[in-house]
Image (cartoon, rainbow, N blue to C red):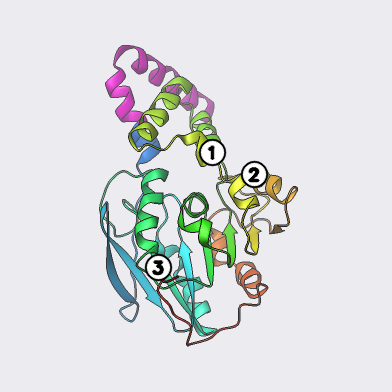
Amino acid sequence: MKKLKTLWTKVSTQTLRILVPNLAFKIARNAIFKPKKKHSNWPKHVKVFNVETRYGQLNVYRYGEGKCIWLVHGWSGSAFDFWPLMQKLAEQGYSTISFDFPAHGKSKGKFSNLPQMIKVFEDLSANLFAPNMVIAHGLGASVIANSQWFKRYNKDLLLISPIIDIYQFMQNRAYHAGFDELLIKRTINEIYRREKMPIAELCIISKLKAFDGQLKIIHDTQDDFIPFTTSENITLSSKTIIVTPNKLGHKKILHSRKVLNVIESFNLSANKHTLQWSNVS
């Protein structure tokens, strides 16, 4: 049944690309650049504030007191994905900050893409307390590593199931869904052309290898959304430490004790008197 559905998708999208290219583009854009929104119910005692960006106001959430940790969600995720982890970190004496990218969580919008998320992150990073650690999940890793802000950051970085090569990732997902390959290629290139960020330049392998801070990766060996081999390739040629749990998948890993263990291994001692603005040199 799945093979038939994949075949039908391939034939229909190929036909649309040839006969009705504008409609084919819209269908492909919806499939690739429209994240799934999930309900979030933040407790009232979480501090919520808005930060103005070039794409409008975004929701930012802060919880706890102490050294600051940023948590950056991935595609079709939200800040609320980190809420269980934020509580545990706050109990240990940390201040945690997370936020919803455009078209994610409680932020407005229907469509988003990596270049847009990078630009938004640049705006946000200038208006938040400077972090002693950054934790990024999935596409959040590509957002962080491709930012100008990252070139100046040299403290602790934890990547959870990171997307390393966005183009390869998008092609693989489209292929397994059965989309016409030429349609997907044209759609991706057109969106990234509009954003003035060539997609070929957004692979983060070289940027992570050049990182001066301490980098650790935790990636489930059986992650069926982002293959473990993408993270393994980085650790084979760098000093990066990788932790490899299994049977946790792509989302469940966020709520795993193993993530907290990796955070604790950075030896980041809590301190309630170290908050500084990120844009202060």
Is 94 in front, or is 244? 94
Nearer the viewer's eye, disc 3 or disc 2? 3
Q: Residue 183 location in percent, x, y?
A: 41, 22
Vertically, is 45 above or below 202?
Answer: below
The amino acid at mark 2 is Thr
Residue 207 versus residue 172: which sits nearer the camera? 207
On the question of residue 1 being in view, the answer is no
Residue 5, numbered label: none
* Contact, mark 1 vs mark 3 (Cβ under 8 Å): no
The residue tagged with tag 3: helix, strand or loop?
A: loop
- Check disc 3 and give the amino acid type: Asn
In percent of width and height, residue 99 lies at: 37, 63
Above or below 157: residue 23: above
Q: Is residue 83 visible?
A: yes
- For marks 1 and 2, give the CA distance: 10 Å
Instruction: Please report whichever mark, 1 or 3, sits nearer to the chain's N-terminal start.
Output: 1
Q: Of marks 1 and 2, which one's residue comes earlier in the chain?
A: 1
- Classify residue 38 by image quadrant: bottom left
Residue range of the region highlighted in magenta in the rendering: 1-28
Say whether marks 1 and 2 touch (CB < 8 Å): yes
Residue 169 numbered mark, or none: 1
Name the chief secondary structure element in magenta: helix
**Residue 75 vs residue 118, the one in the foreground:** 118
The residue that disc 3 covers is: 279
Give the residue pinned by disc 2.
Answer: 230
